[in-house]
Image (cartoon, rainbow, N blue to C red):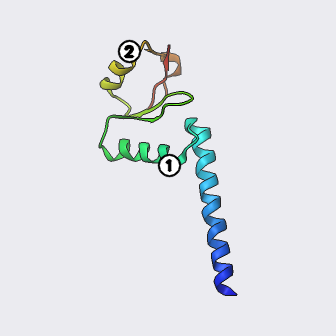
Amino acid sequence: MKKRIIIYITIIIAAAILISATIFSIYKFSVINPFSSCFGMFQILSGDKEYTIVQNYPHKVVFSKPDVRLLDEYMKKRGFELSPEWRTNGGCFYIC
């Protein structure tokens, strides 16, 4: 009987963490898949990459380090330009 209760509690906690991570990912990054945004953040924070694409559909989401010239070139080649009024601490937004 105690094993079942522990299993149920573990399942409920795991589900709550997954739902919370999904809501945070959607709210903060507009990415439905929380694993994609988590691994993208890990790649940027660990120093492996200067930028990474975490979602392609329905819109492209790119994570980058704050001062990345490579990302600026990448975005300019695709017809985007930096929007100074939308620039935030540690991030930037591009407009088409």
Front residue of 73 and 82: 73
In the rendered view, would you say 91 is above or below 40? above
Q: Which quarter of the image is occupied by the N terminus?
A: bottom right
Q: Left or right of 18: which side holds 61?
A: left
| Disc 2 element | helix
**Residue linked to disc 2:** 76
- For label 2, the crowd category at 10 Å Cα-Cα, with few meaning under 14, some 14 to 19 and many 20 or more, is few
Which is in the foreground here, disc 1 or disc 2?
A: 1
Q: Amino acid at mark 2?
A: Lys
**Residue at 63% over, 68% down:** 11
CA distance separating discs 1 and 2: 28 Å
**Residue at 38% over, 32% down:** 66
Front residue of 93 and 61: 61
In the rendered view, would you say 15 is above or below 79? below
Q: Amino acid at mark 1?
A: Phe
- Choose the circle earlier in sequence order: 1 or 2: 1
**Residue linked to disc 1:** 35
In the rendered view, would you say 5 is above or below 31? below
Horizontal and vertical percent position of residue 4:
67, 81
Q: Left or right of 51: which side holds 54?
A: right
Farthest front residue in view: 57
Horizontal and vertical percent position of residue 90:
43, 33
Q: Quadrant of residue 44?
A: top left
- For label 1, the crowd category at 10 Å Cα-Cα, with few meaning under 14, some 14 to 19 and many 20 or more, is some
